[in-house]
Amino acid sequence: MRGLRGKRVGAVKEGTLIATVDVGATTNTGYCTSVDGRDMKVFKFGNTKEGFEKFSHMIVAARNRFKCSEVMVGYESTGPYAEPLVHYLTDKPVSIVQVNPLHTKRLKEVNDNSPGKTDDKDPRVIADIIRLGRALSVVVPEGDAAYLRRLNNARERHVGERTALLNQMQQLVFLIFPEFKTVIPRMIGKTVRFVLKNYTTPEKIGSLAKEVLGEDMRKRSWGKLGMKDGELLISAARQTVGIKEGVAGIVLDIQHIVAQLEIVERFISEIESEMVVTLGRIPCSARLLSIKGLGVVSVAGLIGEVGDFSKFRTQSEIMKLAGLDLYEVSSGKRKGQKRISKRGRSLMRKILYFAAIQMIKKNGIMHGYYESLIARRMLKMRALVAVMRKLLCIIHAILRDDRDYVGEYCAPRRRVIKRAA
C-alpha cells in the first residue's frame, strides 16, 4: 500500500473518532478511540466480507458511544494487504489516512519505554500518531490511472525478471564458451538469443560456415553485426577453453532460459502496447508526451504513480510525494548539506531519473540547464537531482495550468546588463 501516500492531513478536530488497523495477511487488529483518549478494546477481524462488515459495525458502535460526528480510519502503509480494506471503505462516510512505518517504529518506544511489538500495541501507536496530526492522506487511483499503475508495476517486475535471467544466461555461457562475450559484448537482444537457441555449444558454432552464421546475425541485428562478426565467433568457438564435462546439462538450462526470455520480452511488449492505448484515453498525456525525453513508459508511470495531478496544489506537495523534497541536518556551528529525503515513491524517482538522463544529453531540453549547474562546480549527481526536481515542477505546472510545453523554458537564463544612460 506504499503507493497510495499523499500529503499530510494535519491536526484532528474535536469530535472525531479515530479507528486504526494493524493490517495482516489473514487477520487484522482494529482499535477505536476518541480525540480525548476514550477508547474501546482492540478486536480482530479477517480479510473477508464478514470481517470488513464487523469492522464497520465496530466503528458505528464506537461513534455512537463516544458521540463523534466524524470518523477517521488509519493504518500503517506496509505491503499490499490494506488495499482491499481501503477500497471497501472508499464508499463509506469516513476519511482514510495512513502513517509512515518509520514513525510507528519510533513512537512505540515512547509510549511504554519498550521496543516490544504486538498486534494489540500497534493500532494504539497508529492512533497516537494520527492524534498528533502526523498522518498522510490516501490517494486512491481510479479508472485509467489505476490501470496504468498496475501495468507499470507489472512491467517493473518483469524487467527485473529479465535482468535476472540475462545474468544467469551470461554465467552459464561463460562456463562453456568464455570467448563469446569478446565477440558480442552485450548479451542481450534477438541475435544472441537466436545463436544460443539454435547453436548453443561452441562445437555447433565452430562447425558452421561463416556465410551462414554471418547472414543469420545480420538479419537479426538489422545490419549491426555481419560476416566479420560471424567469422570471429566461429574462430573463437574452435579455440575455446570452456569446460567439456556436463555440457549437456548446461545446454538444457541455457535453452530454457532463452525460452523464458522470449516469453518475458513478449509480455513486456504487450504491456507497453496497452500503455499506448490507455494513454490515448487520458487527455493530459498528450501534453506530457510533447516534452522531448518523456516516452510512453515514463508518462504512463508518472500518471499511474501520481493519479490526479490537480489534487496537488503546490509543487512542494508533489516533491514530497516523489521523495525529492530537501532536508539538512545542522547543529550549532555545523552546517549540514542539503539532501533529498527519499521518503516518497521510489518508482516515481526512478522514472524521473531515467527521464533526466535523456534530457541532459547534448540535444536534450535540459542540457543547457545541466551544464550551467556543472559550471558552478556542482557535483554531477546533485546536478542530475536538480534536473529531476525541475522536470517535476514543469510537469506539475503544465498539467495544473492546462498549457502546452514551451521548449525554451528550460534554457539557462542570461543575465541582462543595462547600459548606462
Image: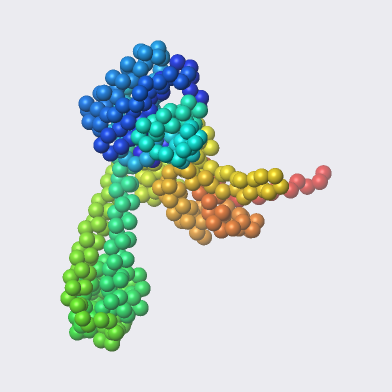
Q: Residue lying at the far bottom in this picture: please name it.
A: 239
- Residue 300 locus on image (x, y percent): 36, 45
Image quarter (top left, top right, bottom left or bottom right) of the N terminus: top left
Say whether residue 274 is left or right of residue 3.
left
- What colouring style does the render use? rainbow
Q: Would you say residue 98 is visible in this rendering?
A: no
- Using the image as rendered, state which of residue 66 and residue 244 is in the foreground: 66
Say whether residue 415 is left or right of residue 15.
right
- Residue 172 locus on image (x, y percent): 27, 72
Q: How many marks?
A: 0
Q: Would you say residue 415 is visible in this rendering?
A: yes
Where 116 falls versus 174 (above or below)? above
- Residue 372 locus on image (x, y percent): 61, 55
Q: Residue at x 41, y 17 (%)?
A: 70
Q: Residue at x 71, y 47 (%)?
A: 333
Q: Residue at x 18, y 73 (%)?
A: 249
- Using the image as rendered, state which of residue 129 and residue 283 is in the foreground: 129
Image quarter (top left, top right, bottom left or bottom right) of the C terminus: top right
Which quadrant would residue 265 be assigned to in this image?
bottom left
Say whether residue 340 is left or right of residue 81.
right
Q: Residue at x 33, y 75 (%)?
A: 181
Which quadrant would residue 61 be assigned to in this image?
top left
- Residue 248 locus on image (x, y percent): 17, 76
Where 303 falls versus 360 (above or below)? above
- Using the image as rendered, state which of residue 68 and residue 390 is in the foreground: 68
- Using the image as rendered, state which of residue 299 and residue 15 is in the foreground: 15
